[in-house]
Amino acid sequence: SEAVLRVEDLRTYFHTDEGVVKAADGVTFDVTRGRTTCLVGESGCGKSITARSIAGLVLPPGRIERGHAWFQPDTDADPVDLAALDPTGEQIRSIRGGDIGFVFQEPGASLSPMYTIGTQLARAIRLHQPISKAEAKEQAIEHLARVGIPSPHTRFDAYPFQLSGGMNQRAMIAIALANDPALLIADEPTTALDVTTQARILDLLANLQEETGMSMLFITHDLGVVAEIADDVSVMYLGTVAERGSVTDIFDRPQHPYTQALLESIPTITTDGTSEETSEETSDGAGDGGRLPAIPGNVPHPNQRPTGCPFHTRCQFAMPGLCDETTPHPIALDDGRLVRCHLRDPDIENLPPQVVTEP
Ligand code: SF4
Ligand code: MG
């Protein structure tokens, strides 16, 4: 199939004393083979939980309630439903770090301070390949060189605290790519880095993708990063995908009011990676995890999910009696994108809202 990953109606809930938190509540998107899909949205929209659900990293009280995450590492392999695997089982552990690489925002989340980066990288290689320690070390040094770590023979023996944030992130990428994954999942991998280092890491990922042909699922809240790295974009809001399409369609002709509001907060970013007069110096907050959208109101807590369209409490086009009562379904537009908004529904848009009473 064209898709290396096909996520369908994924629902991941947390069963807490305060009630059920629907962190992912019907997430649907694809990652096309050899391309990069960005999951973008404000913090708390369910991006990380979606990624963690795919990678088998959701543990109690979290649980995948329903839905699928079909993963097909290459076109002649049988698709595996990652959402159906036991998160503590053998199968997901061999896929994670094998056919799926994972990079987190904080290198500390997966680099141990106790071991040298070389030891950790060699161990990751040997976990998935039956080779000797000496062979693994040789491979590890090659991988460190490939991710742009200078003097890899020396750095093999460095502990994470001896390296900069950018070098640690490169080491993380080396570990994630050690077994030549078909899919790299990167969750805010550059958010903790300064602007220059961030740009270098994005370049590195793009080059590695070109070299290996791997597919990427890239999670970020930063539309500047999306403009630089995405081929396809899924815009998330409160546990669902509001709109998905190609990066040019999303940036040039956003169709969902939430996407429009996000983009209005940073009007000058273009998809060729340049940003007109809004340079890194003049756009305030850019690069330090900045470019946070200035949409009025706050994202409601996922256990106080609004009825109807989840965005209706902040949407300037919300239609009373419709948007607060009826959940919009994804509508396919002619250009291939999907939009979850009543405004785009040809059956509804011509009706006065009062007429529509049933979902
Ligand atoms: Fe706004 Fe209604 Fe569309 Fe939701 S369905 S985005 S509230 S217009
Ligand atoms: Mg997150």
Image (cartoon, grey):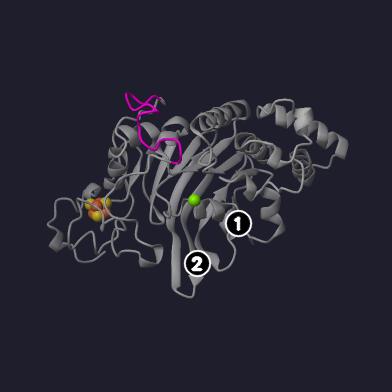
The reply, left or right, for residue 270 in relation to residue 77 is left
Q: Mark 2 highlights which residue? A: 14
> Which of the 4 image quadrants contains residue 297?
bottom left
Query: How many labels, in total?
Result: 2
Foreground: 148 or 249? Answer: 148
Density class for disc 1 (Cα within 10 Å; few <14, some 14-19, many ≥20) is: some
The residue that mark 1 highlights is: 57
Q: Amino acid at mark 2?
A: Phe
163 and 218: which is toward the camera: 163
Q: Is residue 4 magenta?
A: no
Type of secondary structure dominating the magenta stretch: loop
Where residue 116 appears, as percent x and y from the top left, is: 76, 41
Q: Position of residue 46 (x, y in %)?
A: 45, 54
Whether disc 2's CB lies below 8 Å from ligand 2 is answered: no
Label for residue 209?
none
Q: Is residue 324 left or right of residue 91?
A: left
Q: Is residue 90 visible?
A: yes
Q: Secondary structure at mark 1?
A: loop
Residue 92 left/right relative to 243: right
Q: Which one is in front, 351 or 309?
A: 309
Closest to the observer: 145 or 338? 145
Under circle 2, the secondary element is strand
Identify the amino acid type marked 1. Answer: Leu
Q: Position of residue 276 (x, y in %)?
A: 33, 24
CA separation in Å, label 1 and label 2 = 13 Å
The C terminus appears in which quarter of the rendering?
A: bottom left
Tell me which corner region of the image, top left, top right, bottom left or bottom right, holds residue 25.
bottom left
- Span shown in magenta: 274-289
